[in-house]
Amino acid sequence: MFSEGAGVRLSMPQALLLALHVRDAAGLVPPVSDLLPDLPPLAPPAAPLVGASAELAGARVAGEQWARWWAGAFPGGPQALTSILPPRYPGLRGMPELRGFVELDADEAVAWCARARQVEADVLRRVPTALFETNLLGEVERELGRRLRTFRLDVVVLPVAGAHAWEVAGVPVISLALRADRGAYLAWLRERLLAIGRLRGGSGVSGSDGGRTGV
């Protein structure tokens, strides 16, 4: 258990998973920006919709629309999920090319998400970290010479290939592969906790009453 009022919250938003599946299945190449890093392909990989991506009509325009959707939907809460769900796809208004790919990929994307959730569950069962996180926080507090005040660290986890970490719109993003590597994950988390402790003399970020560790 972290210090009273402290917590790390890891989530794998369904909206982002579905969107990434559409990106990979359709072979979309969205433009990279501060809001959209060059995210690797999904792991496990998405099966292509049809043939080579270059043969998919409207793929270039759909990639640009995908980037716009991502910028508005990240970090992928309930409204983001609703935005790409049938029958109305409210978040895809004015994006007919992207909507067409979403409609084509919907069933497979949902099935893939279920498989990805199972991979996630396997990782959490195989590499539990709650006790290690608690010990790590104690080490960080001793290094800082003070207890961390109330904070909440919200982390988006994405099942993409390789062990990576990004910062997107002020939100930390890590790959599931990084979370699966206990040593690498704890090293990454240590740097985040130190940064929180140094910010405003340890006042923390994203303050919250209470908190927990979980996905």
Image (tube, helix red, strand yellow):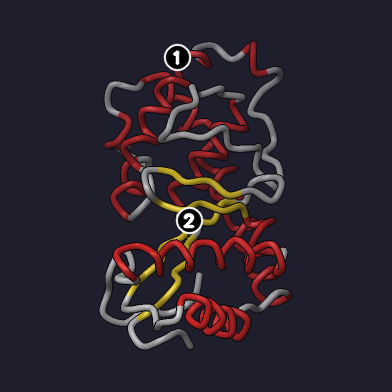
Whether residue 111 is visible: no
Q: Amino acid at mark 1?
A: Val
Location of residue 88 in the rendering, given as x and y in whole percent from the top left corner: 29, 37
Q: Position of residue 185 (x, y in %)?
A: 64, 64
**Could you say whether the residue bearing mark 1 is in a helix, strand or loop?**
helix
Closer to the eye: label 1 or 2: 2
Q: Position of residue 23 (x, y in %)?
A: 55, 31
Identified at 31% across, 82% down, the residue is 210
Of helix, strand and loop, which one carries label 2? Answer: strand
Q: Position of residue 203 (x, y in %)?
A: 29, 71
Residue at 61% x, 32% y is: 24
Q: Quadrant of residue 151?
A: bottom left
Extreme residue toward the front, this view: 145
The disc labelled 2 sits on which kind of residue?
Answer: Val
- Horizontally, residue 85 falls left or right of residue 49, namely left
Q: Which mark is residue 112?
A: none
Q: Nearer the viewer, residue 202 or 50?
A: 202
State the mark number for residue 61.
1
Give the crowd class for mark 1: few <14, some 14-19, many >=20 residues within 10 Å.
Answer: some
> Residue 156 got which mark?
2
Q: Nearer the viewer, residue 36 or 159?
A: 36
Residue at image x 33%, y 68%?
Answer: 204
Vertical position of residue 56 compared to residue 108: above or below? above
